[in-house]
Every structure is written in structure tokens, then in C-alpha cells.
């Protein structure tokens, strides 16, 4: 009787650990994607600033990009189902 309960406990615990690991992997993947997105935004901003300093980009274009960026950052994030 004790052996059966111990086996059930171990099985339940392993299932719980597996579920937690899957959730952690999903969170990690989401964070990795958010980091890549932020890196892309920073890279684009650096390019636009460089073009602005060189006179190849108008201040209006830069302001338009900043407004689009602000709007995108203030919108709720897309969550996978």
C-alpha cells in the first residue's frame, strides 16, 4: 500500500515538474522574441539618427517613426493562444 502511494506521488510530482518546465520554456521563448524585437527597434533608431545627422533623413521622417514606435509600444502585446 505504501509503495503504491509512493509511486503515485512520484508520478504526480514528475508530471508537475514537466508542466512547469514547458511553461518556463514558453516564457523563455517569449522573452527571447521580445529581446530580438527591442534590438531591431534600437538598430532602426540608430540608423535613422545616423541618416538624420548626415542629412539623408528629414526630421519629419524621424518624428513620424517615433510616433509609430510610441503607438506600437503602447498597444497591448499579441499573445499566442
Image (spheres, rainbow, N blue to C red):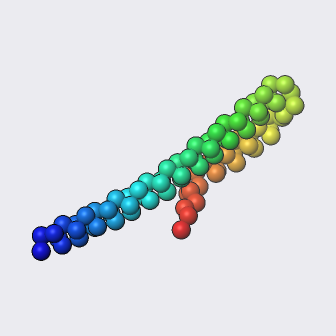
Extreme residue in the top direction: 54
| Relative to 23, 50 lies left or right | right
Percent across and percent down for residue 17 are 34, 59
Asked if residue 28 is positioned above or below residue 50 in the image, the reply reads below
Q: Nearer the viewer, residue 53 or 15?
A: 15
Extreme residue in the left direction: 1
Percent across and percent down for residue 22 are 44, 59
Residue 44 occupies which quadrant of the picture? top right
Residue at the location (39% across, 62% down)? 19
| Relative to 6, 61 lies left or right | right
| Relative to 73, 6 lies left or right | left
Residue at the location (28% across, 67% down)? 12
Q: Nearer the viewer, residue 23 or 6?
A: 6
Count of numbered marks: 0
Residue 47 occupies which quadrant of the picture? top right
Percent across and percent down for residue 26 are 49, 56
Extreme residue in the right direction: 56
Q: Nearer the viewer, residue 24 or 8?
A: 8
Asked if residue 23 is positioned above or below residue 63 in the image, the reply reads below
Task: Tell me the quarter of the image containing the N terminus.
Answer: bottom left
Amino acid at each position: 500500500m505504501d509503495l503504491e502511494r509512493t509511486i503515485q506521488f512520484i508520478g504526480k510530482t514528475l508530471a508537475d515538474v514537466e508542466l512547469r518546465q514547458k511553461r518556463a520554456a514558453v516564457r523563455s521563448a517569449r522573452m527571447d522574441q521580445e529581446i530580438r524585437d527591442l534590438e531591431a527597434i534600437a538598430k532602426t533608431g540608430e540608423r535613422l539618427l545616423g541618416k538624420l545627422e548626415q542629412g539623408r533623413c528629414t526630421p519629419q521622417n524621424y518624428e513620424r517613426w517615433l510616433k509609430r514606435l510610441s503607438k506600437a509600444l503602447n498597444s497591448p502585446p499579441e499573445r499566442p493562444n
